[in-house]
Structures are given as C-alpha cells and as structure tokens.
Amino acid sequence: MVAQPAGDSSIQVSACLDHQALERFLIWIRPLQQALSLEAERGFSDLEGRKERFHCFMQRELATPPEIPLPGDVSPRLQSFADGFADYASLGDAARRRQVTVVRQWLHALRQRLEPSAPMAPPRLKVAQRSTSATATSSSVPALESPLGQVRGIGPKLAERLASLGLLLVRDLIQHYPRDYVDYSALRRIDALVPGETATIVATVRRCHGFTSPRNPNLSIIELQLQDPTGRIKVTRFLAGKRFSNPSYLHGQTRQYPNGATVAVSGLVKSGPYGISFQDPLIEVMESAQAPLRSSRIGRLLPVYPLTEGLTADRFRSLIERVLPSVRLWPEPLPRVRREARQLLSREKALVAIHRPESSEQLQQARHRLVFDEFLLLQLGLMQRRAALKQRSAPCLRITSDRDGLMGRFLTLLPFEFTTAQQRVLAEIESDLDRAEPMARLVQGDVGSGKTVVAVAALLKAIEAGWQGAMMAPTEVLAEQHYRSLCGWMPPLHVTVELLTGSTPQKQRRRILSDVASGACKILVGTHALLEDPVAFFRLGLVVVDEQHRFGVRQRNRLLGKGLQPHLLTMTATPIPRTLALSLHGDLDVSQIDELPPGRTPIRTAMITGSNREEAYELIREEVEKGQRAYVVLPLVEESEKMDLRSAVDVHRQLADEVFPDLQVGLLHGRLASADKQAVIKAFACGETSVLVSTTVVEVGVDVPEASVMVIDHADRFGLAQLHQLRGRVGRGAAASHCLLINDSRNPLARQRLEVLVRSTDGFEIAEMDLRLRGPGQVLGTRQSGLPDLALASLADDGSVLEEAREEAADILREDPELRDHVILSRLLDEQRSRVTSAAQLN
Ligand code: ADP
Ligand code: MG
C-alpha cells in the first residue's frame, strides 16, 4: 500500500472495488466528470443538454450512485453535493465556478481512491537516491496523471486555484500552452532600440546610484548609467516598500553594479521626457560580455500564459518549470520514420520548447509539431468516421437511359445550359450515386450559382432508378420556394411533389404522409423538421439538404438513425474556407460550383454612413422608376425577435408614410404566419409592392429577379458571409444591381470588414476574410459549429499544416486502417471521441 501524501486528509486508504463494481462505478462517474469539465470549459453557463440542463443532470446523477460497496463517507458527501446543485442556476459565476471545482476535485480523488489501476503519483517520501541510472531520475518525476496537489511545491490552496482553471493533473499543466511570448531575445545596440519593443542590451556600467524618493519614503530607486559602443542609456529600477529605503540595503544594491561591470538588460523600451529608457527591466551582471547568461529570463523568449487569477506570471512560469520534467513520460504518437520524413520535432521536445523556447526558430518548430498533432487527430477521426459510413450499404441509383430518361428530359426542358461547373458537379454526384455506398457530399457555391437545379437533377436520377427523394430547407419560406420551383418543372415529367411544413393542415398532412409511405409521392419538400417528424418513406434514396451550415451534425446522424441509408447531398451558399471545410466536414466530399451562369451583371457595392441615408432612398426611387424593386434589410437587434420586429415595423412605417408615400412598401419579418409571409413575398415578386422592408428572413433563397437594390441598415452588425448572402438577393436578373451598406459604426475594424465586401464579390474570398476577422466560432455560429477543441492550431493561419496532417492521416490509415500498430494514436483518438460524444450529449 502506498502511503498517501500528507495534506490530503480527505483521501483515505484505498478501498479497491472488485472488477464488476469498478466497471459500474466508472460508468457512473465518467459522464459526471465529463459534464463537469465541459461546464468549466464553456464558462459555467449551466449548459443546455439534449434532455436537460447541466445542473439537473448533476443533481440526479450525484444523488444516485451505483449500488456498489462504497466507503461510508461517500454517500453523505454525494448527497450534499447533489443538494448543492439544486440552486446552481441561481448562483453567480464565481459561486458556480467554486462549486464545479470542488466537486471536480473530490470526484477525481474518489476515482483515484477506488480505481486500483490508476497511476499514482510517486509518494513524497524523501528517499536518498543515487542518481546513477536514468530510471532513478525518471521515477522522481511526477506521472502525467498525477493530481497537481501531489506535486512537490503545490499545496492544496494552489491546487484548488489551478483546478478552477481546469488544471487538475500534471498533463493539464503541460498542455496549458503559452498565449504569447515576450521576446527578450532581440539583442540590440543602444542606438537601435525602438520604443514599444522588448529587447536586450549588453552594456557597461558607467555609474550607479541608489536613493529613496524625496516625496515618497516607500519608494526607492536605483539608477544605472549604461554605455555600449553606440550610445548611453539610463536604466531605472523602482523598489516599492519601506524595507528598501534602508540606506545600507540600497548601498548593497548599488554595489552589485560596480563601474565597468558588464550587464545584460532585458525589458520593454520606453521613450520618456529624457530620451529612451527601459521600464523596470531585468538586469544581470555578467562575468564578461561573452559569458553565458544564467538568468532564465534575460535574453530569452519568455512565455506568457492565459490569464491566471491570483497567480503572478512568474509564479505560473515556475509552476510549469516544476512539471516540465514529466514530459519525458509523454507518449510519442508518431513513429520515428514518419516524424523524420516530415522533419518534425519529437513530441517531448516540442512540449518543452513551447514552454521554454531557446529561439524563435525552435518555437516555430515546436508549434508546428503540436499543431500538426492536433490536426492529425482531427483528420484521423474524420477519416475513420467516413470509412465507417462507407461501410454501410446504400441504394445503387445507376440508370441506363440517357437523354430520354427523367433526368435527361429535365435538362433538355431547362431554358438554359448548365455551366461547366454545374456539369462537373453533377457528374461528381452521379458517380457517387452509382455506387452502393452512401454519398456524403457537400456542394458549395455562391448565391445564384445554380445549386438548386443541380440538386433537382440528382433527385430525378434517384426517382428514375425507382427511389424517392427528399429536399429540406432551413426555413418554411425557402421550402415553399423550392416547392414552387419544383411544381413548375415536374408536371411535364409527371413526378409527384408534396410540401410538408409546420403549417400544413392536419388532414392534408395525413394524406401526404400516407402517399410518402406508399411511394405514390416521389419528392417530399420540407423544413429540417422533416427529420424530427415520424415520416416514413417507402424507399428513400436521396436526401438533399439546403444550407448545410444550419444543419447540425446531430440531424445528419438522425437521418442515418432512422435505419435508412439514403445518399446525402448538402448544399451551402455560405462557402466555408477550405481549412474549415476540411476540419468540419472531413467526412464529406466537397464539390464547388465556382462559376456563375452567364449574363449576370456584377453588383455594385458601396458603403455610406447613416447620415447619408437619403442617397440610398434616391437610388431606390430611381430604380423603381425604371421598373425595378428594392429591399431594405434591418439587422437582428440583440437577437431579440421582439425588438427586431419593432425596428422593422418602425422603419416600414417611416418609409411608407414619409419617404415613399407614393410607392407600395411591403413588410416581412419572422413573426408573420407562414401564409402571410408567402403573401408578402408574392406581392413583392409580382410587383404589387416595389420596396420590401425585411428582417434577415430574406437572407436565404428568396428569388426575385426584378430586385436590383439592396440597402442594408447597420451593416456593421452583420457578419461578412451573411452580408454576402443578403447581397445575393439582388443581381439575379440582367439589370445592373446595387448594394448599399449603411455603416453607423466608428470602429475602424467594422469599416475594414465592410470594405472587403465593397472590393470583392467572391464568396470564397469573403468567407476567408470573415474567418480571419471574426474567428471560426463566429463564422459558423458557436452553438452548432461542432468544432473540436484546437488548443494551438488556427484554422485561419495553419492551412498548410492541416494539409500535411491530412496527407499523413490518409497515409497512416492506408497502411493500418484499424490503427493496430499505432496504439498511442488509437488511444488518443478514443479519448477525443469520448470528449466529442460527451459534448454532443450535452448539446
Ligand atoms: P443557388 O441555389 O445556387 O443560389 P439557383 O439554383 O437558385 O442558385 O439558381 C439561381 C437562378 O439561376 C435560378 O433562377 C436558376 O434557374 C438560374 N440558373 C441556374 N443555372 C443556370 C444556368 N446554367 N444558366 C442560366 N441560369 C441558371
Ligand atoms: Mg438556393
């Protein structure tokens, strides 16, 4: 029996469980631990799970531990924790954090106590060790799984503070990467110092002088005059505190810097009233100008860690130093050959160097290795998932007829020819459908690039092969619009289409459901709610999902969960940059329609300020006189539908009564009933109204070719991709179209963002900029982004590393699909998967 470290009085001697009990214990405790760490990760927001909120889950689970022989002190403690969660929702942030932290720590200790195989930290017995062999040293190093409280020099108080930052184990601290570095390594001559930079100089002491401030007896000052071949500089150190004002202490201090001594000085360069100086720098006396520096800070890249409440930067750095020796225990996931082929640092070296870089080159290499690993795991996970998907069988939709079949006839009936890009993408889809494995393809294409017709062609192929198709859109408006286009195209082909939405009357609904079940209805159009409803298909062969970015991973799985293996085609008009697409949808094939149908006149975009609103109204008037129509779009106000509505109603009234009393002005917003929305859109489409005031409801899909002006109010409140979408509502006809962005913000960044739109009409470029300026969470909407946690990797900047990792992942799986020979990778993947699943469960 290992003696428990002193100070952990709450942990008693281990009472190991038998195998079965242990299993049940683990099944109970793991989700608890996962929920707790997720809650901490997401900022103690009382996460909304699929079934319930975080605190309900905790309350119930803590109160119902498995019926196994638990030590006597456990049950009452669990009950009191459970009770504690009853009013979690009403607690403030700090109290929530505290509660989560305490329970987390306690559960961790409990698990350590009951799990016999759990690696224990080495006992803190001071055994005299002869450091003759390597093993002796490595055994004195804390295990990666050791709780931080058991590391020498970290007391219970400190451990608790670290736990509240999510740092429980030695490995957590090692993976707590610096947020930034202060570069003290730039060695400069005095005359080359630049204010605002951090730098290091090596210079000779000319004079040193210590005194207590005449105005403040608590402040003492040491002043050094330094000189190098290029100039002189005054360096000042401030010593705050009464004890420093003792003359003999000050004298002792100045004696450290005798005239003629060589010193190295590192710090932030400031320009003051008396020229350039250093602000409270680090100073080290050197034996000579060539001697190596002893300081761990001077002349180096100093790591800066994410904010740590109540821990000074130096303290934190010394903590890291304490656990860093444990990196030698870190398993290396990549075989040596692969590492060397890609010239990657070892994981161990990279981990050390990220915390303690010797040079910026080394830091670069370290970062590269760690980012590579993050992407590698991500890609391996996605590729395995995809391989699993491909294992299931799907209907083979091969058709023999060519031009005289349904699809062929549809293409002939269309009043236009497919663009080359459309033809290529349709061919890619067709070859997927010819195989008996489920297609999972994402079609990206700018607004108006003609994705819908491609999807319809694919649907017809499925029907021709004897199957049914479904088409889903994110909103009712859009579903209805798809339905209407289909109703225009299908009659000559004798293909039955039905529309099913939340507002379909019961009777009709029942009939449609029965037609879908019997196979009489060939294409069912609906909102994503189709998936939630108990819709049974006779033979569902292909599902088309419009606007993929609003379609969560969960819905995708639900589709498969119905026991069906239909082919899946998703379409998005908000192209995501390739890096994002690969990280998010590495399990999808991606096709791009990167060409617009001919005859479109580019949209002219301009930015104006709110005070020049009149210009916009003039433009609207001019265009309407030419027989065109205009949109005026208002932003979502603070996500609140109510306020949203109010601003739309107000603006509508103002435009209708004051600005355009002679024109018909329509109003569209999310609160309207579906039939009313339809009526408003129809009135606008047929020209009964010539100006349409709208909230962002028009964003997706509304198609009125005569609309040639788009005015977007408070454009600064929208994301770039969304603005691009909105802009895509005009320019659908042959007339020259205009988009006016009204920017009320003084923020230069907002201006810069909007200028991207003025300059570019390329959806891919805009998406790339959006990602860069706002980050992936914002671009995708944090809630459903489904992005795995990347600690270091940046989707905006590390595209090339992602590509490398992707190649490597494919190569590893080609050689070893089950990862039998890559045990560590396989284990890391399992860990990642269980993290993602627990996240999905809570989501
Ligand atoms: P998306 O769904 O990509 O926004 P749509 O499929 O709705 O685009 O197409 C936009 C408009 O362009 C529709 O009116 C459509 O009929 C038309 N269209 C599609 N493909 C072509 C083409 N190759 N040539 C001319 N017009 C096209
Ligand atoms: Mg579309």
Image (cartoon, rainbow, N blue to C red):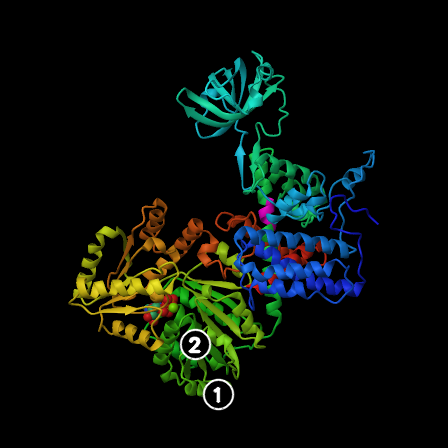
| Number of the label disc, if any, that sits on residue 43 | none
Does 402 appear in magenta? no
Q: Which residue is mark 2?
A: 526
Question: In the rendered structure, which amino acid carries the disc numbered 1?
Answer: Ser
Secondary structure of the residue carrying tag 1 is: helix
Lower position in the chain sequence, tag 2 or tag 1 = 1
Mark 2 and mark 1 in contact? Answer it, CB < 8 Å.
no
Q: Read off the magenta span.
A: 369-373
Question: Under 8 Å from ligand 2: the CB of mark 1?
Answer: no
Expressed as whole percent of the image width and height from the top left, the position of residue 818 reads 68, 61
Q: In this rendered view, identify the residue nearer to me: 44 or 726.
A: 44
Secondary structure of the residue carrying tag 2 is: strand
Q: In this rendered view, identify the residue nearer to me: 159 or 811.
A: 159
Residue 341 visible, this orientation: no
Q: Is residue 711 above or below residue 435?
A: above
Residue at the location (45% across, 55% down)? 778
Q: Which residue is mark 1?
A: 514
> The C terminus appears in which quarter of the rendering?
bottom right
Residue 339 visible, this orientation: yes
Q: Is residue 465 above or below residue 618?
A: below
Residue at the location (35% across, 58% down)? 723
Does 372 appear in magenta? yes
Residue at the location (36% across, 79% down)? 489
Q: Going by the image, does 16 lie left or right of 461?
A: right
Expressed as whole percent of the image width and height from the top left, the position of residue 582 reads 52, 57
The quadrant of the rendered image in which ligand 1 is seen is: bottom left
